[in-house]
Image (cartoon, coloured by chain):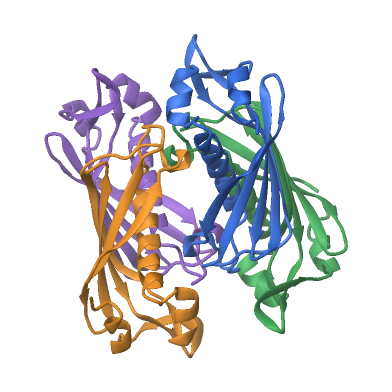
Chain colours: A green, B blue, C orange, D purple
């Protein structure tokens, strides 16, 4: 599939007293980039979740390698794609560019999270519908 | 070494519309838990950094496995320890407990980051002083 | 009423590149301090909300005056109390101390927010039950 | 002056378990909107601050009125302008629109914060240069 692209202008608030992006922010942005990727393919979560009786796409695993910094005012670009579709799980890959250089690579392993009919706050893994996967075929 | 322990009461603001902790928050807490571990051993960063001419302890790698949720009002406990000291790098391990169950395991690979004398915004890896490592021997 | 007290250790992540607490953080802490005040009086929100058919205690107004900074590693203390109970609205006052000095004063005007039976995502203002107010009489 | 405009797509992470934007987020966005307003007028903070020997534009007062909610997926628009320039202080006004309706109005009172030559972590109020104010005359 063609990666989605998301540009982020690094805010003052994204940086810490070491004057670089505070690392957990990248995971916030991974979440945003994943959501935008779905949205671009006609699968905005606020509509997709009720339609498919979902509570969300919770993480079972997240990781990132940090190869370079980003600073206040930098415009960084996230390339995001689904690296693998499994039965109930999918793997989202992220690559972050800053000024021509790859600064972060990340991975999120997410579950197709259905609402639990017996527990309004619960969630259970469900099989990912083929029509969802088909939206990412290009 | 004996792990450090940090209790966190999950705030309303830590949770997302799926009513569980928004996953990047755990990385925020990993950072806090790492800092508190140093502080407990007499190495509070605001004093340690200028003393050792440091700019910080930036990450080169971070990862987490999520095995269970935490919700608004839960008191969760972080166990944090240094799993390995290398020459210029150290590995921090985190294990998060909620109500008798391990819900998250995480790892941060951090660099001993010295200030760069040629660049006030720069940083370079330095050798971890043995007296630092000795503080964690118990 | 006797103010509630909440101690916060300022994290690295709470501070921005100017090396002081990033101001919106105080509003995060106001929210936490308000929640803890209720909890101390036996009114933990995760139980109180379903019991009183509430969706939350949303803000209609928030403000703060900033008189001094806090920095990474400072332990700051929030004093929090209800300044006024109106029919459907209550006013929470916050005073933040750092090292013997008042650094921030804030105010939140909050609505007693009932779930809207006609809209699962909606909310409407309700009359604050006298038994709630009675819990704050001391 | 002509207000600056900033569009924000409300992220999942911006919302809380009540499924509306967690209110302190608006202050984060006020900060971003203020910074973008300066940037649009050729005064990007990462360059402006060193040039004018500044440490920042810290707040002395912030407030907001909340008139309506925003939810995950909403595109909200911030209109931002300087309401008043005083000698060492300026007042930034924010008006937030969601789907044709004003949902938040906010105000930030900010100081022109010079670096303190006697204290690398300090700051003191300075007179706002007329050339800065002139950039906002339209």
* Location of residue B135 with respect to C110 vertically, above or below: above
* Location of residue D60 with respect to D54 vertically, above or below: below
Work out which residue is located at the far top of the displayed protein and give it: B118
Work out which residue is located at the far right of the displayed protein and give it: A87
* Location of residue C16 with respect to C34 vertically, above or below: above
**Quadrant, the N terminus of chain D:** top left
Image-based side of B132 in relation to A135, left or right: left
Q: Residue at x 72, y 79 (%)?
A: A116
Q: Residue at x 22, y 43 (%)?
A: C100
Image quadrant in which you'd find residue A88: bottom right
Res B46 visible: yes
Point out residue C43 in the picture as x, y percentages from the top left corner. 41, 77
Image quadrant in which you'd find residue D13: bottom right
Work out which residue is located at the far bottom of the displayed protein and give it: C117
Image-based side of A113 in relation to D134, left or right: right
Image quadrant in which you'd find residue C41: bottom left
Q: Nearer the viewer, residue A60 or C11?
A: C11
Q: Residue at x 44, y 74 (%)?
A: C44
Point out residue B13 in the picture as x, y percentages from the top left corner. 48, 61
Point out residue B137 in the picture as x, y percentages from the top left corner. 65, 30
Q: Nearer the viewer, residue D110 or A80?
A: D110
* Location of residue D104 with respect to B79 vertically, above or below: below
Q: Residue at x 31, y 72 (%)?
A: C110
Point out residue C7 in the picture as x, y percentages from the top left corner. 37, 52
Work out which residue is located at the far front of the displayed protein and give it: B138
**Quadrant, the C terminus of chain D:** top left
Image-based side of A32 in relation to D113, left or right: right
Res B121 visible: no
Numbered label tally: 0
């Amino acid at each position: 599939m063609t990666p989605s692209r998301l540009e982020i202008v690094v805010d003052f608030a994204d940086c810490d007293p070491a004057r670089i992006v505070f690392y957990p922010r990248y995971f916030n942005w991974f979440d945003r980039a994943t959501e935008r990727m779905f949205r671009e393919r006609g699968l905005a979560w606020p509509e997709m979740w009720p339609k498919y009786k979902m509570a969300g796409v919770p993480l079972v695993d997240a990781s990132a390698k940090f190869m370079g910094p980003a600073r206040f005012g930098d415009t960084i670009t996230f390339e995001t794609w689904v690296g693998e579709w499994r039965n109930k799980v999918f793997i989202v890959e992220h690559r972050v560019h800053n000024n021509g250089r790859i600064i972060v690579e990340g991975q999120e392993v997410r579950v197709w999270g259905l609402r639990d009919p017996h527990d309004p706050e619960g969630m259970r893994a469900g099989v990912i519908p083929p029509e969802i996967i088909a939206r990412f075929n290009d």
